[in-house]
Amino acid sequence: MPKAAARAKSAARPRAETDGAGPVLDLSRYVPGLLTFLANKLSRGASALYQREFGVNVTEWRIMSQLALEPGIPAGRICQVIGFDKGPVSRSLATMARKGILTIEVDRADARRRVITLTEGGRALHDRIIAVALERERRLLACLSPEERERLLDALNALHENLPAVNRPIAVEPD
């Protein structure tokens, strides 16, 4: 079956069906599940590769990526961008400081704030890993045309911007 026909047929299916006991999700059509499954599998593969080749896990890589973009940012900004809680980020930062990947210093303008920066060695490590990260992305997107890649990026950015609507309280009916 051609790709477009398969997509059209797939689009016609409902996202929730009933199995006799109640509604069940069609996981091949449930977007939050598909995004989670994809992200988990990508993260697991990246973490294994980065740990083996570079001695860092995927959380540490995400932190390094953010620090390369925004040197000197506080931990709260890292949490905001990568969507992690402060606990795992704080533990990763401490580990990375011990490894000499980054420095954590008191902000001279505000003693309550910590400024986090990649060391020279941390930046060099970042530059080695980014080549591998971009190759993994290239391989992931190889099945899409350039136009499909652009539509995917537009859709992902729109979904990201729409997260506040998703995370607003939902009235749940009592049993």
Image (spheres, rainbow, N blue to C red):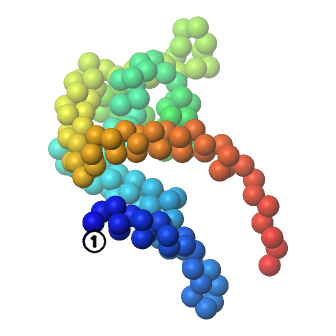
Residue 24 shows in this picture: yes
Based on the displayed image, in which of its 4 quarters is residue 101 positioned? Answer: top left
Could you tell whether 52 is left or right of 169 in the image? Answer: left
Q: Position of residue 99 (x, y in %)?
A: 30, 33
Against 12, is 98 above or below?
above
Determine the residue positioned at 57% across, 38% down: 161
Q: Mark 1: which amino acid?
A: Met
Q: Where is residue 30 in the image (x, y as percent from the top left)?
A: 51, 65
- Residue at the limit of the structure toward the right, as seen here: 174
Determine the residue positioned at 25% across, 33% down: 130
Determine the residue positioned at 34% across, 45% down: 148
Against 28, is 19 above or below?
below
Report which residue position mark 1 lands on.
1
Could you tell whether 85 is left or right of 132 in the image? Answer: right
Q: Position of residue 153 (x, y in %)?
A: 41, 40
Q: Position of residue 121 (x, y in %)?
A: 24, 23
Instruction: Specify few, some or many for label 1: CA neighbours under 10 Å numbering under 14, 14-19, or 20 or more.
Output: few
Which part of the image, by quadrant, shows the N terminus?
A: bottom left
Give the secondary structure at mark 1: loop
Determine the residue positioned at 54% across, 28% down: 77
Which part of the image, by quadrant, shows the C terminus?
A: bottom right
Against 148, is 101 above or below?
above
